[in-house]
Image (cartoon, grey):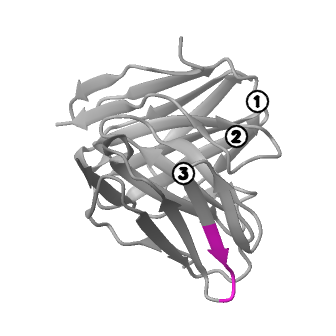
Amino acid sequence: DADVTQTPRNRITKTGKRIMLECSQTKGHDRMYWYRQDPGLGLRLIYYSFDVKDINKGEISDGYSVSRQAQAKFSLSLESAIPNQTALYFCATSDLDRAGELFFGEGSRLTVL
Amino acid sequence: QKEVEQNSGPLSVPEGAIASLNCTYSDRGSQSFFWYRQYSGKSPELIMFIYSNGDKEDGRFTAQLNKASQYVSLLIRDSQPSDSATYLCAGPLVGSQGNLIFGKGTKLSVKP
């Protein structure tokens, strides 16, 4: 089993729908992240968390929210999805003191029609 | 805006050649850089990191950091078709508690 697991792996939805992407990890890492990847734009940080009581906005947080339900679980929500949120979303983890050494999940491909 | 920039490629090299991937950055205060490899349809995986000026070697891979010129490079010796992937350079996102800012990636193709 993967150390960082994302669900769903693929999702097609309609504009205005609420979507939740879930991430769980077995690496025991404190830091968790959500990134989105778009062709030509690379990986961009949406939100990150150091622990269940610590949530921080990244480069592109507008239109997204997150919840850190436990040390091992970090979910990303799109309250009202729009087409330009169509992207590949990655969850990642790292040790508290090794923020650059990221371990990524398999990715969740989201299409908003 | 602090940035990390890469040539998007594609970079094509013959099998057995040295592939040279380059990255420039704008923040003079950056201390550490990371190279991730991403196969098509897969997630990025860390292959090298470098924290100090100079070279760091790991098998067929060498990372080079030149702080004076603000560039980072990754050399892949004896390139193999299995090295064909997109390579992402990443540096610290200033003021973001150690988080990374990624370049857009360079696509490498190693031809048999």
At a point 60% along the width and 20% down the height, the residue shown is A3
Q: Is residue B95 magenta?
A: no
Badge 3: residue crowd in 10 Å (few <14, some 14–19, many ≥20): few
At a point 57% along the width and 44% down the height, the residue shown is B46
Above or below, B81 against B69 in this view is above
Badge 2: residue crowd in 10 Å (few <14, some 14–19, many ≥20): many
**Magenta-drawn stretch, dominant element (helix, strand or loop):** strand
On the same chain, marks 1 and 2? The answer is: yes
Point out residue B26 in the picture as x, y percentages from the top left corner: 58, 82
- The residue that disc 2 covers is A49
Q: For the residue labelled by badge 2, is the local secondary structure a helix, a strand or a loop?
A: strand
Residue B105 vs residue A7, the one in the foreground: B105
Asked which quadrant contains residue A95, the reply is top right
Magenta highlight range? B64-68
Above or below, A87 against A74 in this view is below
Q: Chain of mark 1?
A: A
Q: Residue furthest bottom?
A: B68
Estimate the spatial distance between the alpha carbons at disc 3 and disc 2, rounded to whole Å: 35 Å
Nearest to the eye among marks 1 and 3: give it: 3
- The residue that disc 1 covers is A52
Q: CB under 8 Å between callouts 1 and 2?
A: yes
Nearest to the eye among marks 3 and 2: give it: 3
Q: For the residue labelled by badge 1, is the local secondary structure a helix, a strand or a loop?
A: loop
Horizontal arrangement in the rendering, residue A76 relative to residue A40 (left or right):
right
Residue B58 vs residue B98, the one in the foreground: B58
